[in-house]
Image: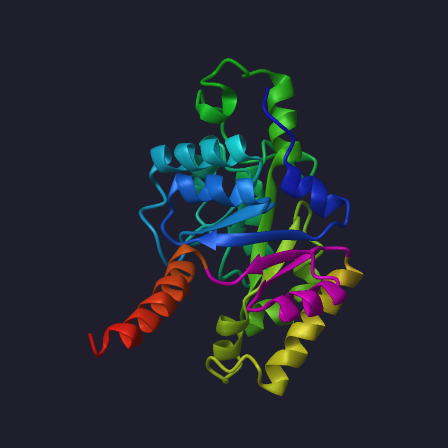
Amino acid sequence: MRQENKFLQRLTNGKVILGAQTVTHKPSIVELYGDMGLKFVWIDFEHIGPAPQNSKLFEELTRAAQLSGTELLVRLPGNDPPLIRKVLDSGVRNILIPRIETVADVRQAIEASKFSYDNGVGERGIAASRVSGWGSRLNEEYVHIEDRNTAVGVMVENTTAVENLNEILCVEGLDFVVIGPADLSVSMGHPLDDSHPDVQQTIKNIQQTAKEADIPVGQLASSTDEAKELIDDDVQIIRISGGEIAALRSVVETRFDKLTEYTTDK
């Protein structure tokens, strides 16, 4: 029997959810993060990684997540309904759509992820895939279970999305938003200066507007202190910065530098 989506459950219950990114897209890293107690693993296919059409990879990643008790949060490369359906069929339950700007963008993504949507029929299709037990669970209950356990979020990372934010947050089926400060800073004319007062104020406005609409917010935390500040600001989804490459670099470089000093005169 397919388990309930713990990521979505925690969102619904107002709990803080801590996770981290894997940049190598390796199931072993997903399993390790789950064993460490992280509640989600951020998988990015917008900027890095192999082709997201690789169902076998997603099946392996979701198995690792299920084995270790964590959930995947997959950022797709774009708002592509066929790809959304394919990824969900592999077992992924939490998807994040980048570069959205309008209500129509958001509705398209959510509709592609649901069998039933907004008192009508959604655009998700039936398939004898991994998520359905290779067809063994295909019945009316399966459709309801999947709709109930699929979470769709969108990135708020450009000025158009900010201008349309009130309407976007009212879209039926939107489960969360994630703020993208780097792209937002570019869109606002302050490239990579997300500490600029205008950018910071916009981020605060997004947080507050989402809170008033009762839509959970996610953000990246570059330090423990920043994570604490985000939690105090009622940000629920916290992605801890770094990943396995950053961790390896930190450990190996530190030890290498010390040993280099030690061996200079040897």
Q: Nearer the viewer, residue 108 or 151?
A: 151
Coloring applied to the structure: rainbow
Q: Residue furthest front?
A: 266
Please say whether residue 72 is visible from this viewpoint: no
Looking at the rendering, in which quadrant would you find the N terminus? top right
Q: Nearer the viewer, residue 191 or 227?
A: 227
User: What range is drawn magenta here?
Assistant: 214-242
71 displayed left or right of 246:
right
In this rendering, the answer to whether 108 lies above or below 206 is above
Please say whether residue 260 is visible from this viewpoint: yes
User: Where is residue 233 shown, x and y percent of the image?
Assistant: 74, 67
Q: Nearer the viewer, residue 84 or 245?
A: 245
Q: Residue furthest top?
A: 136
Residue at 41 percent across and 55 percent down: it is 244
Residue at 50 percent across and 77 percent down: it is 187
In this rendering, the answer to whether 231 lies above or below 26 is below
User: Where is residue 113 shown, x and y percent of the image?
Assistant: 55, 39
Residue 219 in the magenta stretch? The answer is yes
User: Where is residue 93 shown, x and y percent of the image?
Assistant: 55, 38
Residue 250 in the magenta stretch? The answer is no
Residue at 64 percent across and 42 percent down: it is 7
Q: Residue furthest right?
A: 212
User: Where is residue 221 shown, x and y percent of the image?
Assistant: 58, 66
Residue at 65 percent across and 38 percent down: it is 6
In this rendering, the answer to whether 14 lies above or below 53 is below
25 displayed left or right of 194:
left
